[in-house]
Amino acid sequence: MTRKLVCSFLFGFQILLIMLVAISTADAQSSPQIFEVIAPPICQNSRGEIVRFETRTSQTAKSAAGMAKNDDNGKPVIYRFSYERSPAALQKFVDMHECAHHQTGDIDLPHPPRNSPAHMMNESIADCIATLRIRDEIDNGASRINDAAQALASAMAVVGFPKITIDSRLSNINNCRLKDTTADDFINGVLAHRGLK
């Protein structure tokens, strides 16, 4: 009888341990990893104005997100959302991507309809400029681009982007990384094409 009681107790204790491990694992997976937020880069718009970076809180953003626009006073700004939820390489990429929208004059032009060819071209150009800047301005830039691309792919998958969209974006980033040009020359070409230079 005592042996049955001891066995029952040990079995119950094992079940309790398994449940505690399962609960703590689930809790750890539901709690997002917190990263140190990096300082923003220097950014000027196509008119030579300094772009201000402003951190905003977001309860819904699952990874770093940015928004380039002009504030209520017409001054260029980039809003940074949930940067603490992404590694430094992705934070840097998002900053440079949003800065590119200011550098190419996107912010001062009529915004094309979301997901239209013109909108997607603006996004591809911003990705390319971000890639070129990281490659050329940051120590070990090629490695940072790879880190950013991996983090970007993961973040896009979590949000629900289809694999083909993620693969297309990563292909564009890789093609830009191999371009024989600088970010400044690329930006000047975009501005000239748009009649802004």
Image (cartoon, helix red, strand yellow):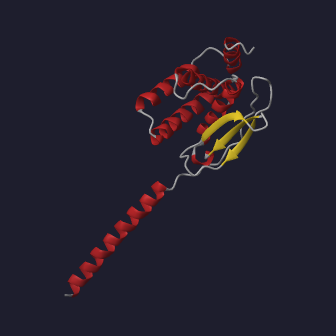
Can you give x and y, in whole percent of width and height, for residue 32 in the image?
52, 52
Task: Indicate whether 184 appears above or below 87.
Answer: above
Quadrant of the frame with the C terminus = top right
Can you give x and y, in whole percent of width and height, for residue 124 in the image?
56, 23
Residue at the (57%, 52%) spot, across then down: 59
Can you give x and y, in whole percent of width and height, for residue 45 in the image?
75, 27
Task: Indicate whether 9 appears above or below 86.
Answer: below
Residue at the (80%, 25%) spot, across then down: 48
Is residue 139 shown to the viewer in this render? Answer: no
Disc tally is: 0
Say whether residue 172 is left or right of residue 188: left
* Residue farthest along the bottom direction in this orientation: 1
Task: Indicate whether 128 appears above or below 60.
Answer: above
Is residue 110 shown to the viewer in this render? Answer: yes
Residue at the (48%, 39%) spot, across then down: 154
Can you give x and y, in whole percent of width and height, for residue 11 in the image?
27, 74
The one nearer the camera, 53 or 196, is: 196
The one nearer the camera, 34 or 104, is: 104
The one nearer the camera, 144 or 47, is: 47
* Residue farthest along the left direction in this orientation: 1
Quadrant of the frame with the N terminus = bottom left
Residue at the (71%, 19%) spot, across then down: 184
Quadrant of residue 72 within the rendered picture? top right
Quadrant of residue 47 within the rendered picture? top right
The one nearer the camera, 133 or 67, is: 67
